[in-house]
Amino acid sequence: MMDASTDRPILVAVANPDHTPQLVRTASDLARASDAIVRIVSVVVKSHDSPFSVYSDETIIEQYAENSRKLLDSALAVAPDDVRIDDAQVVSRSVSDGILTAVDETDARALVVGWEDRKRRTDAVLGSTNDRLLERAPCDLYVERIGHEADGVDSILLPVAGGPHVRPAVDVANAIAARNDAAVSFCSVIDDDADPSVARESIERATTFLEDAPGPPVRSESTIYDGGDVVETLLEAAAEHDIVVFGATRQGAVHRRLVGSIPRRVARRTDRTVILARDGDAVGGPVIRRLRRLLPTP
């Protein structure tokens, strides 16, 4: 059993064998940059009305979680050899509760999950599970769109406009760039009424985060786009890169406050790999995190 007090892992939650290589690869890049361990987690759901609710979690894992075990084995099979790998099955009332339990029990430094855009109208922005994780997971969170993988990585686009989530966005861009000998391209889009100095300051701040990010140094460049529609400008820029990384924003209605309309609109119109990054400290911070561990998960 991993000692969570001395080795905070990068967690990656898996639910579909077709999606595991993409998510495990991103988690491994983050772990490689920070010399961390990857823990692959599969949640076995024991709902209130399930006949398995009378069994202990240990019994469910030993006797009734064969598919979960096969899923983890398939994930382990695609994990890189140069990264330390661990795995765990978690029994819980829901997928989100199980993932949150794994985050708390291991004091995870980051969590990687997948987002499959089904293009249907719903109040859930990235799906109900991911929305709950965006609001509650007390660690850095990376939501990667499933099914759009870069075939080789030469450059990573990272739009910046300030806010608390730039640092984790830079961390994952840096980690992927380091593995692929790629460049990180910062950009900012200003409209006619904006102060260009704010855009320059945002890029300078992101560049400082890149210089301080764990792992080997990577190449970077920056561009400020002046005027025009922000979404259309970013879509044109994304076409010149392999991966787009966004820091979450707090704009829009309450249930969309951590995602923001621009990242969602770009993600749904580009064929590039898209990763949304959210800072764990911006959600609660260390004090709130310790208090949450004293309270039951509803």
Image (cartoon, rainbow, N blue to C red):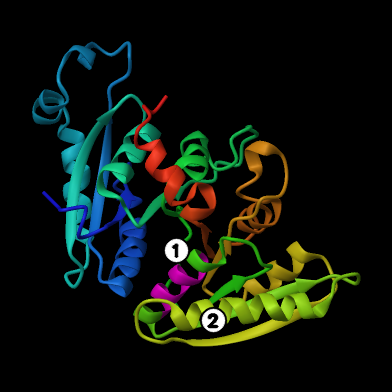
Secondary structure beneath dot 2 equals: helix
Residue under the image location 51 percent in, 45 percent down: 134
Relative to 170, does residue 180 appear above or below in the rendering?
A: below
Q: Is residue 224 magenta?
A: no
Q: Which residue is mark 2?
A: 208
Q: Nearer the viewer, residue 71 or 209?
A: 209
Residue type pointed to by label 1 = Glu
Residue 78, label in figure: none
Seen in the image, is 208 located left or right of residue 13?
right
Location of residue 66 in the rendering, given as x and y in whole percent from the top left corner: 15, 33
Q: Is residue 171 magenta?
A: yes
How far apart in space, not on screen, are marks 1 and 2 (Cα)? 28 Å
Seen in the image, is 108 located left or right of residue 291?
left
Residue type pointed to by label 2 = Thr
Give the residue furthest to the right: 193
Residue under the image location 42 percent in, 24 percent down: 298
Residue 149, label in figure: 1
What residue span does the magenta drawing correspond to?
A: 169-177
Residue under the image location 62 percent in, 73 percent down: 239
Location of residue 138 in the rendering, given as x and y in whole percent from the top left corner: 42, 47
Location of residue 223 in the rendering, given as x and y in whole percent from the top left corner: 69, 83
Q: Nearer the viewer, mark 1 or mark 2?
A: 2
Location of residue 199 in the rendering, given as x and y in whole percent from the top left corner: 74, 76
